[in-house]
Image (tube, rainbow, N blue to C red):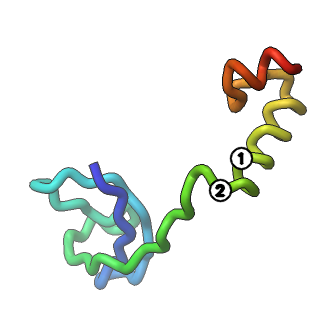
Amino acid sequence: MPYYTYRCTGCDAVFETLVRSADVPACPQCGSQALERQLGAVAPAARTPGMVGKARAQAAREGHFSNYSRSELRRK
């Protein structure tokens, strides 16, 4: 299911939601289905060195090594 950002034309609320292709979402504040789909930000690539480094640092702080490959775990 895609994740979309909508703006309600009734109450001007902006919200994000997961939507199936056949479903029409409703505004969580006023219940209106008069919505405009907004342009969303593009997600960065998940395997960039900076993101991997941050995820590994957080995992080490939390005491788990889920972001490491098996060969890297053997070196730890």
Disc 2 residue type? Thr
Expressed as whole percent of the image width and height from the top left, the position of residue 15 reads 43, 67
Q: Crowding near pointer 2: few (<14 within 10 Å), some, many (20+)? A: few
Q: Nearer the viewer, residue 49 or 33?
A: 49
Q: Which residue in the protein does label 1 denote?
A: 52
Expressed as whole percent of the image width and height from the top left, the position of residue 68 reads 72, 28
Looking at the image, is 38 positioned above or below residue 45? below
Disc 1 residue type? Val
Q: Crowding near pointer 1: few (<14 within 10 Å), some, many (20+)? A: some
Give the residue displayed 10% in from the left and 55% down from the top: 22
The secondary element bearing badge 2 is classed as: loop
Expressed as whole percent of the image width and height from the top left, the position of residue 52 reads 71, 47
> Which quadrant of the figure contains the C terminus?
top right
**Residue 48, located in which quarter of the rendered image?**
bottom right
**Distance between the alpha carbons at the discs numbered 1 and 2:** 6 Å
The secondary element bearing badge 1 is classed as: helix
Looking at the image, is 76 positioned above or below residue 20? above
Give the residue displayed 69% in from the left and 25% down from the top: 66
Q: Which residue in the protein does label 2 denote?
A: 48
Q: Are marks 1 and 2 in contact (CB under 8 Å)?
A: yes
Query: What is the residue that sits farthest to the left in this orientation?
Result: 22
Q: Nearer the viewer, residue 48 or 62?
A: 48
